[in-house]
Image (cartoon, rainbow, N blue to C red):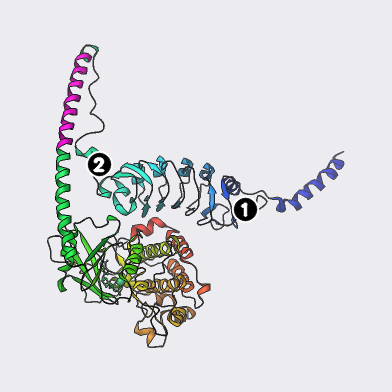
Amino acid sequence: MEMRMLVRVLPIIFAAAVLSPCSLALTQDGLTLLEIRSTLNDTKNLLSNWQASDESPCQWTGVTCHPHELRVQSINLPYMQLGGTISPSIGKLSRLQRLALHQNGLHGIIPNEITNCTELRALYLRGNYLQGGIPSDIGNLSYLTILDISSNSLKGAIPSSIGRLTHLRLLNLSSNFFSGEIPDFGALSTFGNASFIGNLDLCGRQVHRPCRTSMGFPVVLPHAEIPTKRSSHYLKGVLIGAMSTLGLALVVILAVLWVWLLSKKERAARRYTEVKKQVQRDASTKLITFHGDLPYPSSEIVEKLESLDEEDVVGSGGFGTVYRMVMNDCGIFAVKRIDRSREGSDQVFERELEILGSIKHINLVNLRGYCRLPASKLLIYDYMAMGSLDDFLHVKETDVFEPNVQISSCFAEHGPEDRSLNWGARLKIALGSSRGLTYLHHDCSPKIVHRDIKSSNILLDENLEPRVSDFGLAKLLVDEDAHVTTVVAGTFGYLAPEYLQSGRATEKSDVYSFGVLLLELVTGKRPTDPSFVKRGLNVVGWMNMLLRQKRLEDIVDKRCTDADMETVEAIIEIASRCTDANPDERPSMNQVLQLLEQEVMSPCPSDFYESQSDHC
Ligand SMILES: Nc1ncnc2c1ncn2[C@@H]1O[C@H](COP(=O)(O)OP(=O)(O)O)[C@@H](O)[C@H]1O
Ligand SMILES: [Mg+2]
């Protein structure tokens, strides 16, 4: 009897043992991803390899897993023309660190369940049609470093829990319909206007707009004592009396405010006619400010521009001299006086400038205005207090830190300071600059090729946050149709070989220059440093030579004592891909950004961000 049983059971066990490896079920994360796909509208069928018959989702388009685990680490599906909604199932991906669904056509809400993904570090939902509010528990995502939900249709108040996100380095809530007071504490108090620009009705310190409540009318009336029955009549009377007095006071204040506004308008109108007269007196004077970005009377701007002199110079470059312009209210701007300009109509030039003036990004230097004076053309930019990356990297031993400071009551002088940058700060600069450039290549329409990426065009703000400057300027100012065999705008050492040869700049020639910039950050050497030029090499050739000789530690700038070889290697690898001689082999800026984010954000972001504020 037992023998017969054994004979029957054995083949089943055998079959199970043989077949089991082929029939392993899809992991739970895989099943969750299929649920997520079911609410997406994959019009282009780009997710066709998301198959239920697979064992794991780790090879699926846009999915990466934690090394040696089958748990989903990131979902990268930007620019995929995906429609539909984000499934609440997203909350089941408890090991998810990066969710990038930007520039798709998603609608619906940001599901609350996303706050269950407690390891999330980067959330990119920019450029969709998402509605509703920000999940109020977003503060639970304590590792969140990047939150970009700009350019959607989101509304409501900004949850104060964002203030708890101590790792947050990039916050972009711009171009939505948010309203109300921006809470001013924790992480939320570290971001400025650029993070909130283009919303329906936000107020608060960060956007330089006082909230109505702060004008002395508390929204919540102070708690009254709980009234007894006997006194309730009396209290009601007092309350009605107080309310009507308050109402009356409000009417009076509004009337006074109205009269004051009217007279102010009149004063402004008078001033405007004065300016107009001044402009007409000399028809060649013209001032254009982009998007109301220069909130000063034209007369003040023109007067300040006309009085710029040698004392205000902060630098000079290929296209002219850069000045610092200080307004009466201590607002500071950088003014570039253009020395040479392409022949052609001023109208075309000004129209193209207007396009450049409309480009806004947290990692780009804002072009605020343009002025044509009889003798010169002037561009008005944001002033970047810490100067350029070039100044920081190539500081001479004897140099004392002297930021762009003018002797004026408007400035608190920065004392002498060590200007060298530690490795953490350099990574932050690499990441921010790649974001600015990616925006120009992939998010602008028409796309913008920079043509002159170099360390002196990476400017730094007070927090050493980088901003790419002079984008599009080279195209505007260099006449490619000139009768010269090859016209290149750009700076020797950064130029891609094919650009040098053909004179035709592309996104890939920018990627090459960005690769050179990465090498400059790693090595601390200019791309034309004598140590390799003497040997007939450029920085790319020199790096390849040292890599072949396995002398990685000789490549790294000695001043970066905090550099860890793992990230150094990764950055060099990215730089060498960017500087591939064949432009087709170079990654796009989008890919570069993704690679950098993966490197900079892992494995231990908290350590990195804590260390980046100290200089080496
Ligand atoms: N917006 C700005 N804010 C502060 N400094 C600036 C600004 N733009 C330029 N500069 C300073 O002026 C110098 C000259 O700039 P530029 O004329 O663009 O030439 P280049 O980019 O070739 O150095 C820069 O190296 C930088 O130090
Ligand atoms: Mg420049």
Q: Position of residue 476 (x, y in %)?
A: 35, 72
291 or 69: nearer the viewer: 291
Please name the residue shown 48% across and 42% down the image: 111
Residue 317 picture quarter: bottom left
For mark 1, give the secondary structure. Answer: loop
Q: Is residue 366 magenta?
A: no
Q: Is residue 294 visible?
A: yes
Closer-to-camera residue (468/357):
357
Task: Using residue 589 as the reference point, say whether residue 201 is left or right of it.
Answer: left
Q: Is residue 341 above or below residue 591?
A: below
316 and 159: which is toward the camera: 316
Magenta span: helix, strand or loop, mainly? Answer: helix
At label 2, the amino acid type is Cys
The residue positioned 42% from the left and 57% from the top of the image is 604
Three-letter code, disc 1:
Trp
Q: Are marks 1 and 2 in contact (CB under 8 Å)?
A: no
Residue 152 in the image: state x and y as whole percent: 43, 48
Position of the C terminus by quadrant: bottom left
Label for residue 50?
A: 1
Frontmost of labels 1 and 2 is 2
Q: Is mark 1 within 8 Å of ligand 2?
A: no
Would you say residue 247 sits in the magenta stretch? Answer: yes
Secondary structure at badge 2 equals: loop
Taking the image as four quarters, which one is ligand 1 found in?
A: bottom left
Residue at the disc numbered 2: 211
Residue at left 66%, top 53%?
Answer: 54
The mark nearer the N terminus, 1 or 2, is: 1
Q: In the rendered structure, which segment of residues is drawn in magenta?
A: 232-255
From the image, which quarter does the N terminus lie in? Answer: top right
Q: Quadrant of residue 369?
A: bottom left
